[in-house]
């Protein structure tokens, strides 16, 4: 039996398609779907309410981590699947995932292959973020010498084989309810972004293992509703990087990270946007950093 948790923020059309794909799955076990509407101020999804579909509503956007915890606290079944609204399952996805998870006691978190709209495999797994890996990405060293300068994103691996990894992306994140409760769920200090990486780290710190299966597939569009809010999206990403660094880096490394994120990275981003004549992007970057400075300085 599995509880599937989907957080909605102005993604109603995507949510409906996602749910349609869930119920096309033929499974020998029960499914419940929990939709957490995160301040969208709409009743569009109310028609979906049924015995196996719950809708929980927040009057304001409490953030992705808080919404996931809210959904998990309402879940009745032994397995939890956190699923992005911009994903769609194939007909055998759930059955294959649950069978693999239940048959392998050493798997604590299961992720799967994700196919985008161009029929490409999304390179979705990650290593733990470190200061050097962050710098490799920021300064583009991973693109110049990918075998030497690796980032936390595992773009250097084709994702065509199954393996244990540090982290699988939260767009499809299957684990037991007991394990989720054991580590305290998602850390709500993260509004959105990197809360799933933080959760994976908490699980592996307790001896858990995270597995990526290339045999199980979903469709993942990517971006979702966040594409509509680019400046705020950048702000949340940068803010979560600093939150992650404050929790998992040494004090000295966090001091360096904070200085680079606040004072060096905006110069790099704005310069790159000017070079590519993305003048609208310059405005969005400035707006994002104004929000970040207001919060962090």
Image: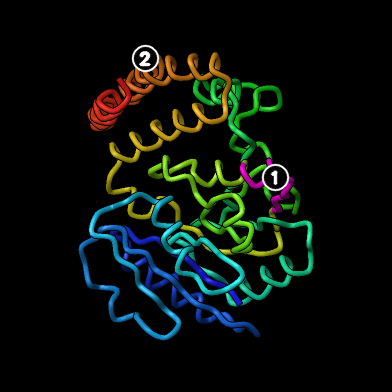
Q: Is residue 62 above or below residue 261?
A: below
Front in this rendered view, residue 243 or 286: 243
Image quadrant occupied by the C terminus: top left
Picture quadrant of residue 156: top right
Residue 101 on image: x %, y %:
71, 65
Which residue: 35% across, 72% down?
55
Q: Are marks 2 and 1 in contact (CB under 8 Å)?
A: no
Which residue: 45% across, 52% down?
222
Residue 211 on image: x %, y %:
71, 53
Residue 49 shows up from this direction: yes
Between disc 2 and disc 1, whose residue precedes? Answer: 1
Q: In the rendering, which numbered label is found on residue 263?
A: 2
Q: Is residue 206 above or below residue 45?
A: above
Front in this rendered view, residue 221 or 72: 72
Front in this rendered view, residue 156 or 38: 38
Is 108 situated left or right of 13 in this image? right
The part of the chain drawn in magenta is 202-211
Residue 223 on image: x %, y %:
40, 50
Q: In the rendering, which numbered label is found on residue 113?
A: none
Picture quadrant of residue 235: top left
- Cα distance in 3D space between marks 2 and 1: 35 Å
Residue 204 magenta-drawn? yes
Residue 195 on image: x %, y %:
49, 44
Which marked residue is nearer to the observer: mark 2 or mark 1? 1
Which residue: 32% across, 21% down?
270
Is 132 situated left or right of 225 in this image? right
Q: How many marks?
A: 2
Residue bearing the label numbered 1 = 206
Mark 2, other Cα within 10 Å: few <14 / some 14–19 / many ≥20: few
């Amino acid at each position: 039996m599995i509880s599937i948790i989907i957080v909605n923020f102005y993604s109603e059309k995507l949510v409906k398609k996602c749910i349609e794909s869930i119920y096309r799955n033929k499974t020998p076990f029960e499914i419940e779907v929990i939709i957490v509407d995160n301040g969208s101020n709409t009743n569009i999804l109310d028609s979906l309410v049924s015995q196996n579909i719950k809708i929980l509503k927040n009057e304001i956007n409490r953030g992705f981590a808080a919404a996931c915890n809210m959904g998990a606290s309402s879940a009745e079944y032994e397995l939890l699947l956190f699923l992005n609204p911009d994903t769609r399952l194939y007909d055998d996805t759930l059955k294959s995932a649950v069978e693999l998870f239940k048959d392998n006691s050493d798997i604590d978190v299961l992720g799967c292959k994700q196919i985008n709209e161009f029929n490409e495999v999304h390179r979705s797994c990650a290593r733990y973020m470190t200061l050097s890996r962050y710098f490799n990405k920021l300064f583009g060293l991973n693109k110049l010498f990918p075998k030497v300068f690796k980032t936390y994103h595992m773009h250097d691996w084709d994702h065509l084989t199954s393996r244990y990894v540090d982290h699988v992306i939260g767009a499809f994140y299957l684990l037991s309810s007991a394990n989720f409760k054991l580590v305290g769920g998602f850390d709500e200090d993260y509004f959105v972004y990197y809360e799933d990486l933080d959760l994976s780290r908490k699980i592996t710190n307790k001896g858990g293992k995270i597995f990526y299966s290339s045999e199980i597939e979903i469709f993942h569009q990517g971006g979702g509703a966040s594409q509509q809010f680019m400046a705020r999206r950048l702000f949340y990403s940068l803010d979560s990087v600093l939150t992650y660094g404050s929790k998992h880096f040494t004090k000295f490394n966090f001091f360096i990270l904070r200085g680079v994120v606040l004072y060096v990275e905006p110069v790099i981003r704005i310069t790159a946007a000017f070079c590519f004549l993305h003048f609208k992007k310059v405005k969005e970057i400035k707006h994002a950093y104004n929000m970040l400075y207001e919060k962090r300085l």
